[in-house]
Structure formats: C-alpha cells, structure tokens
Amino acid sequence: MKRISIVGGGIIGLCTAYYLAKEGYEVTIFDQSPMDDGCSYGNAGMIVPSHIIPLAQPGMIAQGIKWMFDSQSPFYVKPRLDANLMKWGLQFYKHANERHVANAMPALRDLSLLSKELYQDFARENNSFFYEEKGLLMLYKTDKVAHEMFHEGREAEKLGLKVDYLSAAAVAKLENGTKTDILGGIHYKGDAHLYPQKFMQFIKEELKRLKVEIHSGTTVQDFTFDHHKITKVVTDKGAFSTDEVVLAAGSWSPSLAKKLGISVSILPGKGYSFTLKDQDHKPSIPSILCEGKVAVTPMNNDIRFGGTMEITHTGDTKINKNRLQGIINSINEFYPDMQVGMPENKDTWFGFRPCTPSGMPIITRAKKVVNLTFATGHAMMGLSLAPATGKIITEIISGKKTSVDTKMFQL
C-alpha cells in the first residue's frame, strides 16, 4: 500500500487526506501548528460558486494603487523592498486582463460546483457543521458598485448560475427585519455556508476513523531525495519514509518547495475576522458588503465578520487596528442598528491566505519531482474549494481522469 505524506494540516490537507484514505492509501499529515487555528478555522465559512472572477482582473491594479494610500482599505500591499514581492507583482500585472478572466471563470465554476456537491455528501452523512444553502447576498450602496455587480451577475448567469437582482426593499423582505442601509443587492442563489470550526472537528473525526496519522506541532525541515523522487520527509521529530508527497502548506508552501528546487510564487494575504456569539438579531443570509469587501456569515446562533486582504509576509503577526477599523466601519454603515465596536485582541482572529499572482489555486503534479503533488494557493477560497481539491489530488495520484479539467490550476 502506498504511503502518502501530506505537508499541511489546514482544510485542504485534511480533505486531501480524507479522499486518499478512502481510496485505500496509508496517509500521514504533518503540520507545524497545533492544528486548532489558522485560515481553515477563522474564515467566513462560505462555499461560493458565485466567486468565479479571480483576484487578478482588469482594473484591480488601478484600484489597488488607490487603496494603497488608505490604511483602512479592503486591499493593501505592504510596501517593502523584496524580490518575491516584485516578482509576484509583475506576474499579477500580466494576469490582470480580460483573456485570463475569461479562461479562469469556467474553471473556477466547475471546481466550486464539484466542491459544493461533495459538501452536500458530507452534510447528508452528518451535518454537525451547520451546512446551509441560503445563497449569498452582494450588498452595495453606490451606483458605481451596482454597475460592477450587475456586470458580474450577468457573467455568472452566462455560466449557468442562478442570480436575482434585488432592490433594497426586496433585500429587507428576505432579511426579515435586519435593517440594512443599501441601494440594493444581488442574490447568488446557489451559494452555501457552514461553521468552519465545526467542519474541521467533523473531518478530523472522519480521519481518525480512517486511521490517518496526524503529526501536529511537527515542522517539516527537509526532504531526502533519490533520482528525482522524495524518499523521506525530514521533520524536527525524525524522518519518515514515503512514496508520495502532497504539498498543502498554504502560505508556507514556497519555502518548502524551495527545498525541492521548485519556485512557487505565493504571498500571504492577511485577513481578519471576529465572531459575535449568541446574537438574536442578525442577518440570516451570508452577505458581502461590497464597498468594504466585508464578509458577514450567520453561523448557527453566532455571526462572523471578516475582511481585508493585506499582501504581506508570514512573520507579520501584529494586529493592525486600522485594518480592523475598516471592517467595523463597513458593518455599521451597512447595518445601522448593529452598533459593532472594536473587538478585543483575544477575540480577533487573523490568518494568512495563500495568494498566487494569477488568482488561481495550484492543483497539479510537479514536473521536476516525480512523486510530488501541489494543493495550495487557494487565497480566500480554501474552505470553498477544499473537498474538490482533495478529490482531484486523489485522482491525480491514482492515475485517474480528473473530475474537472485542471489546465488552469498548473504551477
């Protein structure tokens, strides 16, 4: 039986382990953290087939430059003299065009719809993680953003997604009583959401049942090679023999790939979230507050707010109150009755989303190393795309035809 080592115990690594173990492989996961925090836990819990336009898109550069001078803006690149940042920026610039977006959209749609089907399978088995299909509301306040949202809605409709265009009154009716100060909203009816912590708990229980070995608090330091093949994963707790390696280490993937002589262009996009517990009055449908790019997700009795994308480095562990203030301002502008204040540091979560310059995840076999597969670079879509990624990686390793075309997910 083939032994497969997965480097990275976030939601991508865990879902990959699940499908590989179901296929009969002997699976071991290594993660440097205690595996109880990180992007897989603090994200907005959205499963979003509606998100078909990659971050690298026309107009994003100009918009990004404007936002650079606003410390509370939704997107920010921390200026620094850094070769990786320059290279990433140049690649991003090359991808921010209509042709790339046109190719990316059907690929992201197919990956998302497969993921949603797999989440439905999980929920049928045991919905301890509050999976719900209520769609997603894109709420906007200005004519300029309304125009952009309508354009995106029409593109989504062309790809077969169900979209409703709503007035402020129609949104209020859907939201039964939560007061919103908006011009209107777009309802993507096929989107879903869940409670991330609860899903992570569920999938870990499944992995235990499938006899997957998990080494948390274990740092992968190097790899032993023989003829373009990894034979051992070298960690701070010893070396482990292996037949295959899956690199699913999110924002830490580039430094590990470098040890294998492979260059991976990923930068961490730092985001924040906080959760208000046991809220009686809260929106019932997940939404994005478009002008501030803030995600709002009801999770059972709680509500989570998340946002901002700060392109930075993994050593940047300080909570930037300005970025957080930008999120809070948006919430209070859109929901005038909510009166949300600055959360305490202990209640503020932040994490590093792995951002590729193309805005596309990397789900592919390595070219130079015969038994290495990449599952990384999902940016803000990690939770949304995890089951599909895990299934495709299993198909790649098993030599089967993949469930969706992976041509857009190459390194």
Image (tube, grey):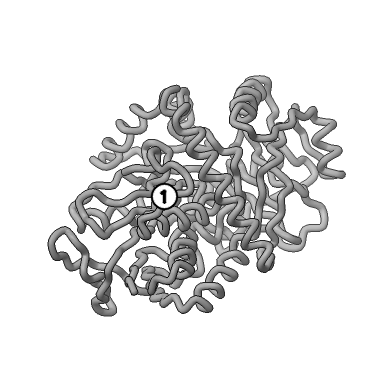
Query: x, y (%) of residue 199?
Result: 60, 64
Res. 123 image quadrant: bottom right
Look at mark 1 in the image and give the residue it sits on. 401
Residue at image location 61% in from the left, 57% down from the top: 119
Residue at 28% of width from left, 79% of height from top? 237
Q: Quadrant of residue 331?
A: top right
Residue 210: where, in percent of width, then height? 49, 76
Tell me the quarter of the image containing the N terminus: bottom left
Residue 385 in percent (x, y) is at: 51, 50
Residue extending farthest to the front is 400
Q: Is residue 315 visible?
A: no
Amino acid at dot 1: Lys
- Vertical relation: 174 (above or below) 344: above
Q: Residue furthest left?
A: 227
> Is there any visible trace of residue 51 in the rendered image?
yes
**Closer to the camera, 33 or 340?**
33
Q: Position of residue 300 (x, y in %)?
A: 73, 60
- Residue in view at x 47 percent, y 35 percent: 55
Q: Quadrant of residue 236?
A: bottom left
Is residue 278 positioned above or below 44 on the image?
A: below
- Horizontal side of residue 371 vs 331, given as left or right: left
